[in-house]
Image (cartoon, rainbow, N blue to C red):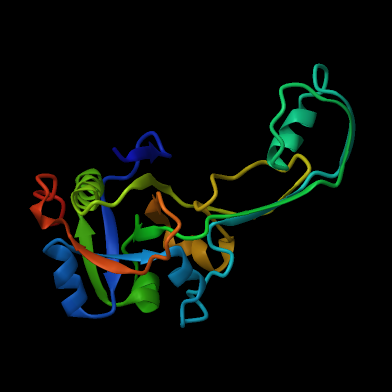
C-alpha cells in the first residue's frame, strides 16, 4: 500500500502541462506520462531550469538558553536541528543541519497557462481537467507496476529553503523553491519517494489503463 500525503486541503483541479514538442503533448494526452526525477532537475542541461538545491534545506539554530517548559522555541529549534526531545533545559549554540531527499520521481504541472511558461517549457500545452483523477491514475499505475514508496502531492511554495533561528518554515522539503526564477511557474507537483535505495531514472508510464484516467484530460 502506498502512503499518500496531500499537502494542501483543496489542491487545484485545473492544471496545465507544457511540452516542447507536439509528440510529447499528444503522448501525455493519451496517458503516457513521463516522470522526471529530483536528480534530473538538479542537473538539468538548461541552466535556467536546473535547480541544484532541489528538495534540500539547511538550518542554523543560533544560540538560545532556558527551559522548554517556559520557552517552546527551544524544542522547535532542536527539532529543526534534527534533535527530537520532549523536554530540554540548558543552552543550544549554532546547531547546523542539512536535509536532502536523495531522489524521487516527479511530475510537475502549473496552475497557469501563460506565454512566459510557453517560452520557458514549450508551446504545446495540455490542460488537465481533473488533477485528482490524474494523480490517482499515476498512483494506480505505479502500484500495478510494483513500485513501492510514499507520495506527496501539493503546491510549491516560493521563498528561502534555508532557515535561521525562528524563521518561519515555508513548506515541507521538496515543496519549496526560490522566488527567482521559479515563482512564475505556479507549480503543483506529485513526488513519489521510492521505498528502496537503488538508483532511479526518468521513465514513462502508461496510466491510460487506470479506471481513474477517464476524464483527466480535455
Q: Is residue 147 left or right of residue 186?
A: left
**Total number of numbered labels?**
0
Q: Is residue 144 left or right of residue 189?
A: left
Q: Position of residue 144 (x, y in %)?
A: 18, 49
Q: Quadrant of residue 81?
A: top right
Q: Quadrant of residue 27?
A: bottom left
Quick check: 64 above or below 192? above
Looking at the rendering, in which quadrant would you find the N terminus? top left
Quick check: 201 above or below 86? below
Identify which residue is drawn at 47% across, 68% down: 39
Q: Position of residue 84 (x, y in %)?
A: 69, 32
Quick check: 111 above or below 182? above
Q: Nearer the viewer, residue 181 or 6?
A: 6
Residue 161 can be seen in this image: no
Quick check: 41 above or below 207? below
Q: Position of residue 210 (x, y in %)?
A: 12, 49
Q: Is residue 166 left or right of residue 199?
A: right
Q: Position of residue 15 (x, y in %)?
A: 28, 54
Amino acid at each position: 500500500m502506498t502512503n499518500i500525503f496531500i499537502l494542501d486541503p483543496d489542491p487545484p483541479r485545473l492544471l496545465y502541462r507544457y511540452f516542447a514538442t507536439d509528440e510529447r503533448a499528444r503522448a501525455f494526452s493519451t496517458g503516457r506520462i513521463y516522470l522526471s526525477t529530483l536528480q534530473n532537475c538538479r542537473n538539468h542541461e538548461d541552466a535556467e531550469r536546473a535547480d541544484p538545491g532541489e528538495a534540500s534545506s539547511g538550518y542554523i539554530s543560533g544560540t538560545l538558553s532556558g527551559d522548554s517548559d517556559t520557552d517552546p522555541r527551544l524544542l522547535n529549534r532542536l527539532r529543526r536541528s534534527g534533535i527530537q526531545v520532549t523536554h530540554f533545559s540548558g543552552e543550544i549554540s549554532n546547531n547546523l543541519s542539512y536535509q536532502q531527499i536523495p531522489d524521487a520521481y516527479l511530475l510537475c504541472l502549473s496552475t497557469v497557462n501563460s506565454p512566459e511558461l510557453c517560452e520557458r517549457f514549450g508551446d504545446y500545452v495540455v490542460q488537465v481537467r481533473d488533477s485528482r483523477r490524474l494523480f490517482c491514475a499515476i498512483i494506480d499505475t505505479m502500484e500495478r507496476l510494483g513500485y513501492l514508496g510514499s507520495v506527496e502531492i501539493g503546491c510549491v511554495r516560493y521563498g528561502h529553503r534555508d532557515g535561521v533561528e525562528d524563521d518561519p518554515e515555508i513548506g515541507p522539503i521538496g515543496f519549496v523553491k526560490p522566488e527567482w526564477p521559479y515563482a512564475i511557474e505556479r507549480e503543483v507537483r506529485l513526488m513519489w519517494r521510492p521505498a528502496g535505495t537503488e538508483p532511479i531514472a526518468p521513465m514513462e508510464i502508461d496510466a491510460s489503463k487506470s479506471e481513474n484516467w477517464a476524464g483527466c484530460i480535455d
